[in-house]
Amino acid sequence: MLLSIRSTVLLLILLLACGVAVAQDEPAITITAPNAGDQWCAGASQTIAWDTTNAGTTFDVLLSSNGGVTYNVIAPNITGTSHQWQVPINITADSMYRISVRRSGGGLADTSGMFRINRPPIPTLQPLNISIPVNNHATFTAQTSGWPKPSVVWQVSTDTGKSWKPVTGNQAVGAETERLTLYYVDATMDGNLYRATFSNPCGSDTSKPASLTVTWLEIVEPNGGEIACTSQPITIRWKLQGFMGQPQYAITYTPDSGKTWKSLATVLQSETYTWNTPLQQAPGLNYRMRVQLTNNPIVSDTSDTTFILYAKPTVAANPHDTTANQGRLVSFAAASYGLPLPEVEWQGSDDNGKTWVPFANPTRTEANGRIETSLRTSAIATNDSGTLYRVIFRNQCGADTTRLARLRVIKDPVAGVEESSELQTFAASITPNPSHGGAATLALRLAVAAPVQVLIAGPTGEIIATPFSSGFLPAGNHAITLPKDLPSGGFTCVVRVGGTQQMLPIVVMR
């Protein structure tokens, strides 16, 4: 009985062993790469691998791009259990790819799960060179194929391509998209190069660089802080960059920090201009220049800060010939405009103007935007008769000298003081002067009734207004309002009384 059991067990073991041997001998192909869900890259070398059992020695490798509906042989008669497949660079990116490995001649085969083939970035649209005026917007566009969709980083080079860095800053919009926009480009960006770098898991590629040419204009002088003088030339220089063609320029200036602008020159072709400022040019502390490219008016530049336009002294009132009694004190007066307000030097000559001696300590006061000065001499004797007096007004832009005034001394203590015929006829003055935007008033005192006419002459001498004209005005004091709409500058008020005329300077500062 025991022997029978042992025999039976032995028989079962032999049968099981024979059964295993039979199972191991069954032909089989098992793909080990790619696996379902793998991601491969176009243009890369990928390993297709499989295991075999009694499946033969040569195999065909097939590829399906539609999930296994149809297959095409990509590698026939492969020996071994792997194949290095160079994935075509132009293959379509998709997730429906399958690999099949079959025994050469057909029959036995295995198929992989579906896997994905991605494509590395390849630029399909290159950015173009751009040339635009300063303060405009520049847009660069670059596109690429590739899957998954590549990320984009725009880069800039400021050294002709030697080095690159990412585009940053508030001026740049879309630096991580296919379209980069640079807002309000400035002169510092002229000559920059821009390119787009595309990246995805299969690699990266970079577009060709595109250049940015910025047309800009810069004033070299006067650009702020300079000091010039009226009636003297001012050299204006500028430079233009990034413009193709024959440029033409226009120049304007402002005397009031930009509130008003006046044309100075047009249709200029050189990058320099000499402004021969007239003597009547209104002085001021707030002048600025602007140069504009008339071919493209958006290209312009304004001097960074204000510059100063000074004016040499201009005598506003002359001392008059005076007659005085022996032993009396005598006084002479004069006035002058100028910016900066001038220094005063009174001089006297007792040899009819051959030599002059300065006086010490004359009075000097500022009134209505001008310097008013007077000189009082000590007690005079008859031998002082015939002495000449004058005033020299000086500042850094020059000097002006009054007319000569002669003193006559008489012995008769009851003799009256002699006045000039001009003062015997009328006296006139203007207040305020300079005028700061409002109307100035001409104060007129008539000794006798007379016809009166008041004219305003512009900087070049032309009559621009007639604020008053009357047949006769009675003797006495009169106030005449002058035009209030005069622009900034220097003008002349001409007062005509009968056959006598007096010209008074008037300055308007707005």
Image: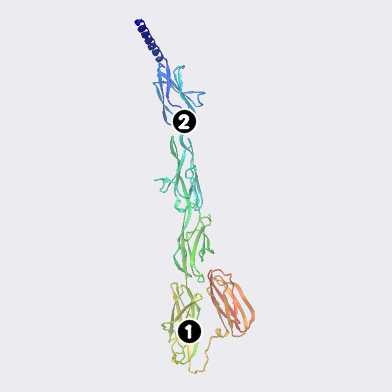
Instruction: Name the residue at the front extreme.
Output: 1
Q: Quadrant of the N terminus?
A: top left
Give percent across and percent down for residue 476: 60, 84
Q: Secondary structure at mark 1?
A: strand
Nearest the viewer among 400 and 426 is 426
Q: Which scheme is used to colour this image of the protein? A: rainbow
What residue is shown at x 44% (from left), y 91% (from top)? 383
Tell me the residue at 50%/74% (across/down).
369
6 shown above or below 209:
above
**Quadrant in the rendering for residue 379:** bottom left
Q: Which residue is mark 2?
A: 117
Tell me: residue 118, above or below residue 427: above
Residue 280 spot, x, y in % from top left: 52, 71
Q: Amino acid at mark 2?
A: Ile
The amino acid type, in three-letter code, at marker 1 is Phe
Q: Position of residue 504 (x, y in %)?
A: 54, 77
Task: Identify the mark nearer the N-term, 1 or 2.
Answer: 2
In the image, which disc is placed on residue 332?
A: 1
Q: Element at badge 2?
A: strand
Q: Nearer the viewer, residue 453 or 83?
A: 83
Q: What is the number of the mark on residue 10?
A: none
Judging depth in this view, the residue of 49 and 247 nearest the camera is 49
Q: Quadrant of residue 431?
A: bottom right
Label 1 crowding class (10 Å Cα cut-off): few <14, some 14-19, many 20+?
A: many
